[in-house]
Amino acid sequence: MPKLVKDGAIVDNEWTLMAKSEEDASSVKVPEGQVIVPLAVWQAQKTTLANRQDIGVWLDTDETADQLGDDARQRPLVAVHFPAFADGRAFTTARMLRERFGFEGELRAIGYFLAEQACYLRRCGVNAMDFGEDREQHLQAAIEALNDFTEYYQSSVDQPLPLFRRRAG
C-alpha cells in the first residue's frame, strides 16, 4: 500500500486520487471507497456525493478555496495540488481553507513539492503530504523537515499568535 506523511508519521495512504477527466464532470463515475475527486466532479455531482463520508475533494492550482467554500467543512479530506515546487498558490489555498472556511479535516498536499517544504506546509494548515508512489523516498526527509524551525515571529495556522504576543502573555 502506498505511504504518506500524516500528522508527523508515515502511514498508509487509504485514499484514491481521481485524476481529472476530459469527459463531462457530471457523467464521471465515482468508484466506491475513499476517493478524492476533482473539484469539477464535486460541483457537478454534489447532491449525490454529499451523503458519502468517503469523498474528499482536490483543488488544482487554477481553483481557489472560495470555489469549494463552506462545502469544505462537510468533507473529511481536502487536497491542494502543487504542479511544481516553485508554485506557491496551494499554500494560500490551504491557509484559506483553514482560516476562512474553518476546515478541520485532513488537509493534504499532492503533486510536486519538496520534503524541505514540509515545515511551511504545516504552517499553512497542511497535515498530510502525499509525495506519490514514485517519490516515497522523501517521506522520512519530510518528517525531519517538520522540525527545521522551533520558533516563528509571524502568526500562522499552526500558531495564531505572533511572537511578540506570546512573549507579552
Image (cartoon, helix red, strand yellow):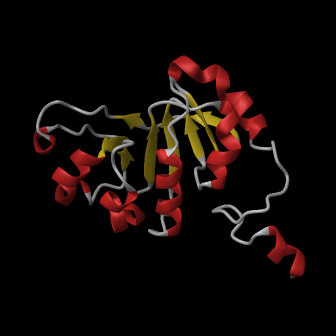
Q: Position of residue 55 (x, y in %)?
A: 34, 49
Left or right placement of residue 131 versus residue 117 in this view = left
Residue at image position (39%, 58%) is 65
The answer to which of 158 and 165 lies nearer the viewer is: 165
Residue at image position (17%, 37%) is 29
Q: Position of residue 104 (x, y in %)?
A: 52, 63
Q: Is residue 79 above or below residue 76?
A: above
Which quadrant: the C terminus? bottom right
Q: Is residue 80 above or below residue 20?
A: below
Can the viewer see residue 22 in this picture? yes
**Which image quadrant is residue 46 in?**
bottom left
Left or right placement of residue 153 versus residue 112 in this view = right
The answer to which of 11 and 133 lies nearer the viewer is: 133
Left or right placement of residue 50 versus residue 139 in this view = left
Left or right placement of residue 48 versus residue 118 in this view = left
Residue at image position (82%, 68%) is 163
Quick one: which residue is furthest to the top in this view?
134
The count of marks equals 0
Can the viewer see residue 7 in this picture? no
Q: Is residue 104 above or below residue 87?
A: below
Q: Position of residue 136 (x, y in %)?
A: 60, 22
